[in-house]
Amino acid sequence: MKMKKAILPFLIIVIALGLTFVMLKSRKTPKPHETPYLGPLVEVAELVKTNRQVIVSATGSAQARHEVSITPQVKGRVSELAPQMVAGGIFRQGELLFAIEDIDYQLAIALAQSSLAQTELELLRNENLAELARKEWYALNSDSALEPNPLVVYEPQLKSARAQRDAAQANVRLAELNLQRTRVFAPFNCYVRSEQVGIGQFLNMGAPVATVAGIDQIEIVIPLPLDELVWLQVPRKGTRQKGSLAKVELQSGGQTFRWQGEITRALGEIDPHNRMARVVVTVADPFSQDSEGGKLLKDLLPGMFVEVQLLGEELTDVIAVPRGALHDNDTVWIVGEENRLHIREVDILRRERDEVLIRSGLDAREKIVLTNLSGAAEGMLLRPQLREVK
């Protein structure tokens, strides 16, 4: 019994070894499997021909189209002042800014009118004397062919009297004009940039007291490279040519505020420092009409630094590709037949911030490689994955 127990473990080991040997002998050797090389995975996009409007991006600062200093033409104390005659106050054309005490100028009109009455009386007296003198001379010299002496018929006296009458009339008109000048009005729709005037203040003639700027038009002076001007319509002086439209934007507080404008002129010279031309974009009615609860940034205020997109010429049958797909020597990578890489030289019509517009060298429905490859070579095998180009 003890002998059986001792032999049993060895028997089990021998049987296990035998089964293992049989299994190893009966196993089939696996055949090697080769995976074909498909090339690196790349993103590609199918090219399309399209019409494209050129957009020239630029920046500039807004400034008022009209700005003038308000200078009184007569002197005196300020007797009336508009409530909005403070920095930032808005005026419509013809509204009163301030008035100067006018009693002195009313008295000046009365004096001028009195002087005019005296000169008219003197002129009338000389006219009567001249008429009598002429009648007497002809009565005494009816048979003479000579003309009377001018002094005899009061011609110099009449000329002097008429001149005095005309001067008196001019003095009356001047006095009336000075009276009108005691009331100063807004020259155009404007806002007050600065002022130094108050009730009771004595103003001297010719001393500026305020500066106002127009609110009907805002201008933005934009510097542009010379090669961008070929795409834009810039009106020439003396013509009625319409300029290119412009979209003006301001980004602030996560919001975008927009205005419409157009190119109205060029400044007519090239900046000698950066060799750039400067064009003027004019925005009409830049101030919001919503005065009830309107946001200040709805107004295009002078001094704002804004972005401007100028809408230029429309190009036909061009192909737009991302700038990242353009490589050295103005070449692009195309996936051809059997997914092979072809390096293609293209003719670039225009380079934009994010895209390049191709004139020739590519055809619609070809697939362009968008992925940047290291060591790319003609005929290289690729594994393309299609992506739409927006």
Image (spheres, grey):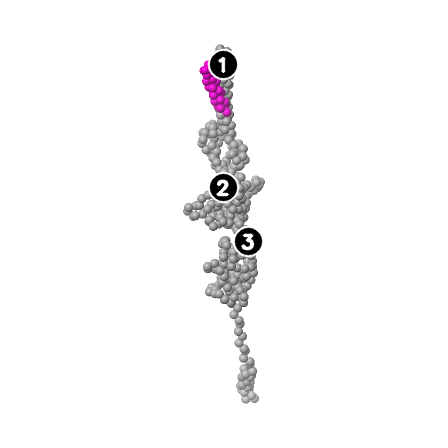
Q: Which residue is mark 3?
A: 316
150 part of magenta stretch: yes
- Camera-nearest residue between 176 and 340: 340
Q: Position of residue 376 (x, y in %)?
A: 48, 64
Q: Report which residue position mark 2 lands on.
A: 237
Upstream in the sequence, badge 3 or badge 1?
A: 1
- Residue 63 visible in the shown view: yes
Percent position of residue 50, x then y: 56, 55
Rendered residue at 54%/51% (across/down):
314
The secondary structure type at the circle numbered 2 is: loop
Three-letter residue code for mark 1: Arg
Check whether the beta carbons of the residues at disc 3 and disc 2 lie within 8 A of each other.
no
- Residue 64 among those drawn in magenta: no
Q: Work out how far the residue at label 3 is from the one at label 2, CA to CA, in angstroms.
A: 30 Å
| Mark closer to the observer (3, 1) | 1
**In front: mark 1 or mark 2?**
1
Where does the image place residue 115, in percent across and percent down from the top left? Answer: 49, 19
> Callout 3: few (<14), some (14-19), or many (20+) C-alpha neighbours within 10 Å?
few
Q: Residues within 10 Å of mark 1 (few under 14, many from 20)?
A: some
Q: Looking at the image, is mark 3 or mark 2 earlier in the sequence? A: 2
Q: Are marks 1 and 2 in contact (CB under 8 Å)?
A: no
Q: Pointer 2: residues within 10 angstroms few (<14), some, or many (20+)?
A: few
